[in-house]
Image (tube, rainbow, N blue to C red):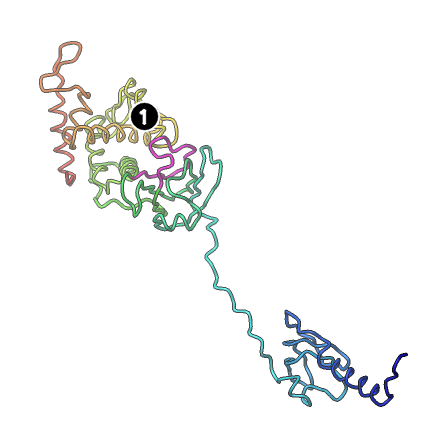
Amino acid sequence: MIKKVPARALSLLVVAAIFLSLFFTALPQANAAARGAWAPNTAYAVNDTVTYSGGTYTCLQAHTSLTGWEPPNVPALWKSGTTTTPTPTPTPTTPPATNGVTFYADINYGGKAVTLGVGNYVLSQLNAAGIPNDWMSSLKVPGGWTVEVYENDNFGGAKWTYTSDSSWVGDSVNDKMTSVKIYTGSQPPSVTKPAEVPSQIWTYVVNADNAYGKGGDFALLLSAVIKKESSFGAGLPGSPSAGDGLMQVEPNTRNAYASQFSAKFGRAYNHSSEQDQVYLGALILNEKIVRFGNIYNGLLHYNGGDNWYPGATDSYGRPILADQYADAVYATYKGYGGKN
């Protein structure tokens, strides 16, 4: 037998259910929303915002609105003004450089590429830019820019300088980059051009000096060698690019250093280019200086060969006067203001 519920008790249950539905049927939503103008018979979630009579109100309790529950009338449900925390504006980040020097992981401009603008980059900064330690096999350098690649962090160790694109940096540089300096133009040498050195010759020797990071002193030495070897080009037959060039590098010697030239400068040697003539002579002279310990000894062996010794003769029995050559060039170099 089913027991009947009294009519009065049933009515009270219905009223209670309706009252509870007004306040608790709408669950709080995860995200607040701007709901526009307040309206009756609408489900609102916590942090929803509405407008009413020119004001803005924020929902404090989830509920379904009724006529008479306008926001100003029910402070338990609505608070004047917005209470949600605005999303903070993100701190702007520096966009990746789009105009600058591009470094490539592989030869021939292949693999991962990262472009860096003007600046000095230690290893941590290279890492932040996406370049790991001991990385880089080729690079593209915009016209008028200069790149100094360093073997060690904080611009230490060996330095290699680039002023143009290089599709292969060579075995001596490949995967050795740990810090980098990038600037527009060439760093001004710390020395003054000797008055007798022609301007175009000075440009060539300064570029070669930059390639070896000598700070200008090497430019003075190269100028002295060119004066001795070719009188700044005037002593060469025909055009200044004829013969064995400004620094009088013999053909067999050019051939012997061809691979080293390509590794250093990223291209094959071009004898018709006066700049390349100076670059090749600088490469050979720098090697002799390093190998034999100082500038004077380097000059001796640049002129007399690796096996030169006092009293040495050539295949015809003629004395090889490398000491007289070194004396003359070294005196000119010191007269230019050479420091070593």
Which residue sits furthest front? 1
Looking at the rendering, the stretch of residues picked out in magenta corresponds to 159-177
The residue drawn where x is 14% and y is 25% is 325
Q: Predominant secondary structure in magenta?
A: loop
Residue 264: quarter of image? top left
* Three-letter residue code for mark 1: Ser
State the image coordinates of residue 295 (x, y, percent, origin top left). 16, 32
Query: Mark 1 falls on what kind of element?
Result: loop
State the image coordinates of residue 245 (x, y, percent, origin top left). 29, 25
The residue drawn where x is 89% and y is 79% is 2
Which residue sits furthest left? 311
Between 298 and 324, the one nearer to me in the picture: 298
The residue drawn where x is 14% and y is 34% is 332
Residue 274: quarter of image? top left
The residue drawn where x is 38% and y is 32% is 266
Q: Is residue 89 left or right of residue 320?
A: right
